[in-house]
Image (tube, rainbow, N blue to C red):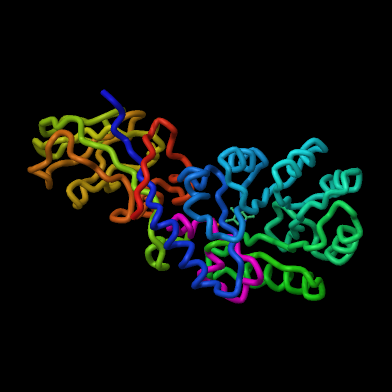
Amino acid sequence: MSRSAFATIHLGALRHNLARVRALAPHSRVMAVIKADGYGHGLERVARALSAADAYGVAAIADGQRLRAAGIRHRTVVLSGIDEAGDLLEVRRLDLDIVVHHDHQLALLRADRDPRPLRIWLKLDTGMHRLGFDPARTDALLAELRALPNAHAELVLMSHFASSDEPEQPSTAIQLGHFRLATAHSHAARSIANSAAIVHCPEAHAEWVRAGGALYGLSVEHGRCGADDGLRPAMSLSSKLIAINRVGRGERVGYGGRYECPEDMDVGVVAIGYGDGYPRSAPSGTPVLLHGRVAPIIGRVSMDLMTIDLRKHPDAKVNDRVLLWGPELPVERIATAAGTISYELTCGVTRRVMFLEDEH
Ligand SMILES: *Cc1c(COP(=O)(O)O)cnc(C)c1O
C-alpha cells in the first residue's frame, strides 16, 4: 500500500492572504514570516508564492541557506540573528539581514573587522521577556550601531507582542506604548505587529508588519478561524478510507478500547495518524469530512490510522477521500479539540505526507 495522506498547498490562498494583509496594513511594508518550513507548508514553495512580500522572515541561517540554494534572492531577515563569529561570514555570503537582540551579538559585531555593512533589525523587549534589549537602552544602542562601520545605516527597530491574539488583554496596548516611547525620536523604521495585531491593532502597524499565520489563513485567536478575518486556509490535509468494518454493539474500537459501539455499526478506517502529524490528542468526536459531511473520529488516533463513525454515511466506500482539515473544515476546529493551536498542527505535518500544490 502506498501512503494515502496528502497535504495540498493552495498557492492562490497564500497570494490572497498576502493581498489581504496589504489591505489591512496599507501603509506598511510586509515581512512574510516563513520560519518552520513556512509553518509546515514548505519553505521554498511558500517563498515563491509570496514573492510579492517586501522581505521574508526566517528563524535561522539554515533557512536562508535553503532559500539561496533554491535561487531565491529576496531580502531575508534571520529573526534570531547570529550566535558566533562564523555566522557573520555566512550571513554576508548569503546576503541576509540579522536581528540583534542581545549583548553577545553586539560584541560579535564590535569585534568584526569586515567592512561590508550588515542590515540590522534591533530588537527591543517591550514586555514579552523572551528576546530583546531593555527599551531604555534604545538611543544608546542606536548611536553605537550607527557608528559601527559594519552596520548598515538603515536600521529597523522591532519588538514582539506576547498576547496580540487576545484583544481584550491590556498588555498589547502597554507594549505598544513602551515601543512608541522608546522609538519616537529614533528616525528609524519600526516593526511590532504580527498577524493578530495586523488584524486587530491598526495603530501598531508602523513601517513594517510581520505576518506569519495570517498568510497561511490561520488564526490563533480563541473561537475564531482565519476565514473570519477574510483569510483563506492554505493547506488541505486529506487521506482515504482503506477499510469499512461492521462492528457489533458493545464492542470496543482501537487502542485501549476507548470507544464502545452503542449499536451494530459501520466503522471506517482512514489512512492517517499521528505519524503523519494528525494530533493523537484529538478525542472521539473530533470531526473529519467525508463527501463534504462530518464524520466523527471514534477511539484513539493511532500512528498510521484512525477510525471514524460511519453511521451517517451509508454510502461510504473504500478509497473515498477524507478531509482532515482545509477550507471546508477549519484546522482551528481540530486544534481546539486537540488542545493546541492551528500553527502547531500545520507545522507538525510530517514528511511522509505527500505534498501537492494547486493554484486555487
Ligand atoms: C513568528 C514571528 C512572527 C509571526 O507571528 P504570527 O503570529 O504568525 O503572525 C512575527 N515576528 C516574529 C519575531 C516572529 O518570531
Instruction: Give coordinates of residue 227: x percent, y percent.
Output: 37, 63
Q: Is residue 350 visible in the rendered structure shown here?
A: yes
Taking depth in this image into account, of 301 and 322 the one nearest to the observer is 322
Taking depth in this image into account, of 25 and 44 the one nearest to the observer is 44
Instruction: Give coordinates of residue 217: x percent, y percent.
Output: 43, 58
Question: Image point 44% across, 35% down: which residue?
Answer: 350
Q: Is residue 223 visible in the rendered structure shown here?
A: no
Location of residue 240 (image quadrant):
top left
323 sits left or right of 215 in the view = left
Task: Tell me: residue 131, above or below residue 301.
Answer: below
Q: Please state the extent of the stretch shown in magenta in the rendering.
A: 196-219
Taking depth in this image into account, of 64 and 342 the one nearest to the observer is 64
Question: Image point 18% across, 34% down: which residue?
Answer: 319
Question: Image point 26% across, 23% down: which residue?
Answer: 1
316 sits left or right of 178 in the view = left
Tally the marks: 0
Task: Tell me: residue 337, above or below residue 23.
Answer: above
356 sits left or right of 285 in the view = right
Location of residue 231 (image quadrant):
bottom left
Question: Image point 31% across, 45% down: which residue?
Answer: 324
For the C terminus, the image quarter is bottom left
Instruction: Give coordinates of residue 47: x percent, y percent.
Output: 52, 50
View quadrant of ligand 1:
bottom right
Instruction: Give coordinates of residue 96: x percent, y percent.
Output: 70, 48
